[in-house]
Structure formats: C-alpha cells, structure tokens
Image (cartoon, rainbow, N blue to C red):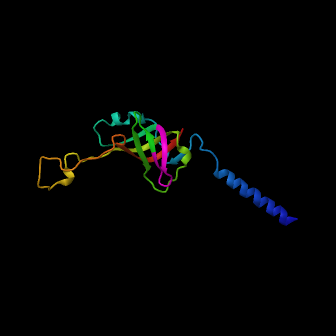
Amino acid sequence: MKATQLLFVLILLSLFSLAQKSQPLVHGKIFGSKPDTTAMVNAFKLETFMDKKVRISTTIRGKVIKVTKRQGGWFDIDAGHGKIIAAHFKIYNITIPYDLKGRTIVAEGVAAKQFIADDGQHFAGDTVTGKKQHAVKTNPKQRLTFEVKGLLVE
C-alpha cells in the first residue's frame, strides 16, 4: 500500500516538473542583466542614431525575426526597411528559447557597425597603389551587430 502511494507521488512530481519546462514565454522575462530603459531607441532608428560613430552603448527595442542559436543567445532583430541587426549575448552561458521569435524585446548592449576596409588598408604593403585590387563583398542588409548584456521580453 505504501509502495503504491509512494509511486503515485513520484509520478505526480515528475509530471509537475515536465509541465514547468514547457511553459510559454512570459511578459517581463529577463535574460542576462535587467536592461536600463531610460534612453531607449527603436531598432529601426539605430543606424541613424549612431550617425558616424562606429560603436555605441545603448538600449534598443525591436522585434526578433529568428533565433539563430539558443546557446549563447544568437538572434536577429528587425531593423526596418529589410535590414537586420545580428545580435548575440556577451556571456555565452545564456540560453534563450526559440519562442522568442516574433516577440518584441528590449535589449541593452553595444551596437557596432560592420567594419569594411574599403580603401585596401588591410592590404597595406601591396606594391600596386591607387587601384582597388580586391572586391569588397558586404551584405547591405546586415551592417549592424549588437552585443547584448541584458534582454527583457515585452
């Protein structure tokens, strides 16, 4: 009798633990540290907000297009006009769910423009000067990267 009661309790506990793992993503869930929302910029205005700066620490608000990799928190944010901001967490041990796709988030971190050595500076020391020897292939839709310190799900 006691063995069947004990078995029943163990089955109930295992069902509760399985149910907790499959809970939906809730509003206000924080990954990493809590972002500072005092000076927030919309993701589609980030490139114009940066102007000629290469790197800037800021908080952005945008919609997640897709989660590329759960471990390390790699995902893409919609920057408007068909542009994408490639984002990832600074700390690799953070795991984000795939349910983040389509959700609006607030993320604090460092935005950086993709550096392109257009004038051949990375080929310094070449003998032929004045000519562009190598074609620079860049994706105009993915010019910005964002290193996330903290993320809040709205």
Based on the displayed image, in which of its 4 quarters is residue 24 positioned? top right
What percent of the width, then of the height, locates residue 3? 83, 66
Instruction: Tell me the residue at 29%/47% (across/down).
Output: 137
Magenta residues, start to end: 62-75
Which residue is located at x 71 percent, y 53 percent? 16
- Residue 23 falls inside the magenta stretch: no
**Residue 36, percent from left and from top:** 46, 40
Q: Is residue 99 left or right of residue 2?
A: left
Is 120 drawn above or below residue 44 in the view shown? Answer: below
Total numbered labels:
0
The furthest residue to the right: 1
Residue 57 horizontal/vertical position (percent): 37, 43
Horizontal relation, residue 112 to residue 132: left or right: right
- Answer left or right for 129 relative to 40: left
Q: Nearer the viewer, residue 16 or 98?
A: 98
The chief SS type of the magenta part is strand
Task: Where is residue 147? Give x, y as percent.
Answer: 40, 48
User: Compared with residue 154, is residue 117 higher up or lower down, i.e. above or below?
Assistant: below
Identify the residue at the far bottom of this view.
Answer: 3
**Seen in the image, is 73 located left or right of residue 110?**
right
Residue 18, located in which quarter of the rendered image? bottom right
At 76% from the left and 61% from the top, the residue drawn is 10
Assess whether residue 66 is covered by the magenta stretch.
yes
Q: Quadrant of the C terminus?
A: top right
Which of the image's four quarters has the N terminus?
Answer: bottom right
Residue located 50% across and 40% down the image: 105
